[in-house]
Image (spheres, helix red, strand yellow):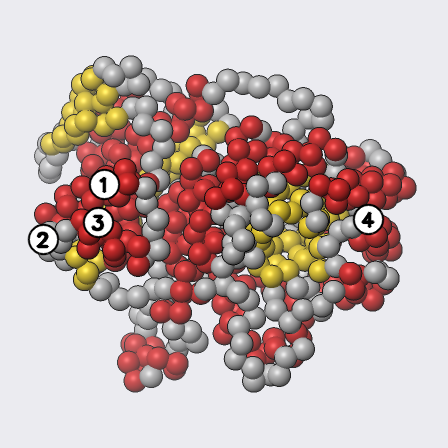
Amino acid sequence: MTQDRIIIFDTTLRDGEQSPGASLNVEEKLTIARQLARLGVDVIEAGFPYASPGDFEAVQRIAEAVGTENGPTICGLARATRADIAAAGAAVKPAYRGRIHTFIATSDIHLEYKLKKTRAEVLEITGEMVAYAKSLVDDVEFSPEDAGRSDPEFLYQVLERAIAAGATTVNIPDTVGYTTPSEFGAIIRGIKENVPNIDQAIISVHGHNDLGLAVANFLEAVKNGARQLECTINGIGERAGNAALEELVMALHVRRQYFNPFLGRPADSQEPLTNIDTRQIYKTSRLVSNLTGMLVQPNKAIVGANAFAHQSGIHQDGVLKHKQTYEIMDAQSIGLTDNQIVLGKLSGRHAFATRLKELGFELSETELNNAFLRFKAVADKKKEVTDWDLESIVNDEIQQPPELFRLELVQVTCGDGSRPTATVTVRTPDGVELTDAAIGTGPVDAVYKAINRVVNVPNQLIEFSVQSVTAGIDAIGEVTIRLRQDQSIFSGHAANTDIIVASARAYINALNRLYAAQQQPKTEATEPPVPTPATI
């Protein structure tokens, strides 16, 4: 099976969510899935349906809402067991195009210590479980976990068996991020040359960034025949993360003349190599960062704050004379535009709603009303409201966790020579308003101590970050925090022109996630046991 473009398989909602502290609720996953559809990804791996009722619901709802005739394929992950595969099949059933992605380990170290099975047993399971998945959906993907460390001859046998049983995509995972580009390219080339029925399936690749080589490995895989890339927004994921979608897409976009011949195209072809709308990249990156609480470092390729900034005088002079002297791509190509002023305090609800639609937001009536009230409050404090401000306002409004504790009042006194003091009023889940005060090392510390006295939910603050949305003293500030309780991490995010208020709201958001998790009934796994998150 050959084709002259690259399929983008996004696993932000499955592998990306395995990043410590990046847990998302169903509504947040749905919000990201809708944006991934606008971005133009071909396949959304929406979750691991058998892992929990919440994961099953998320995959099912994404299949219903996003898996439309003109939308992406919706995929569910499953171990090579009947229970896993049945759950994945049921979860993706509402999608116009549903896919089951099943996997089993093939490296000798995994067979001996994890599976405790022989190669013959793995071969038999592969054929049987792929065939079972094929009986539920037409589109089946198979992964030999830890393929990068598997014996090539055994790997060829497993892939041949999977394709014969009905797999339409075979995914080659570098599960532990161990291989180098030349090695990974050789693995893909070996598969093309030694698996007799490989022409009946698309070769996919999945890889982790433990050595910082994931993107380089994938590009080498493309040169050797891979036609599907499994990646995540901002490269989030288990341990050091996954190959970053934005880096792969823009590398293929900027260097398409180099990659064209490897896909059987004329070198000078200007046709895109992927279906991605690159102008949606920056917005998608921001959305995922805000919802997961995982900030993008300033020097991150493509979407980092410094990616298009020039400090050197020589660079600044060159860019002013001609952008391409020091810029190989236009910032506008990823949706990073100038801070265009579009609305002010006299703008009405219709103009507000129209602009949000132009920016790609689809809000319910309640969300729109709440966002408009937030916009009016900001417009009273800022003379100039930009698109970036609007995005921050709307994201802050629609990304709230269940409102169990509600911040009603926050007031601080601080200054040189004084002791920072905060007073807060919080409405509890029972509807009772409680007020308390505390002294801290600074105003935010005082606010957090006062909130802790009221809510009485034990936690450890492990990360606090503040970012300015736009330039200027009246800019909206975004606060992202992460809390730890036992082994779980919970994130909170909020935006406001008052950074103390934003800090307080972000803390309450994280506490609401923590408290909601505490209230969920503990369910025992049924046969077979739910796996640890580290998969393929």
Q: Position of residue 526 (x, y in %)?
A: 67, 22
Residue bearing the label numbered 4:
165
Q: CA distance from mark 1 to mark 4?
A: 52 Å
Closest to the observer: 3 or 339? 3
- Packing grade of label 3 (10 A; few <14, some 14-19, many >=20) is many
Q: CA distance from mark 2 to mark 1?
A: 16 Å
Query: Could you tell me the amino acid type at mark 4?
Result: Ala
Q: CA distance from mark 3 to mark 2?
A: 19 Å
Q: Residue at x 70, y 37 (%)?
A: 85
Residue bearing the label numbered 2:
346
Query: Could you tell me the amino acid type at mark 2?
Result: Leu
Answer whether labels 1 and 3 touch (C-beta < 8 Å). no
Q: In the rendered view, would you say 144 is above or below 61? A: below
Q: CA distance from mark 4 to mark 2?
A: 64 Å
Quick one: label 2 or label 1, which is nearer the N terminus? 2
Quadrant for residue 227, please give it: bottom right
In the drawing, does residue 24 fall left or right of residue 360?
A: right
Residue bearing the label numbered 3:
476
Quick one: label 4 or label 3, which is nearer the N terminus? 4
Q: CA distance from mark 1 to mark 3?
A: 20 Å
Q: In the rendered view, would you say 173 is above or below 312? A: above
Query: Could you tell me the amino acid type at mark 3?
Result: Ile
In the drawing, does residue 30 fall left or right of residue 306?
A: right
Badge 1 marks a residue whose secondary structure is helix
Quick one: label 1 or label 3, which is nearer the N terminus? 1
Residue bearing the label numbered 1:
369
Quadrant for residue 226, please give it: bottom right
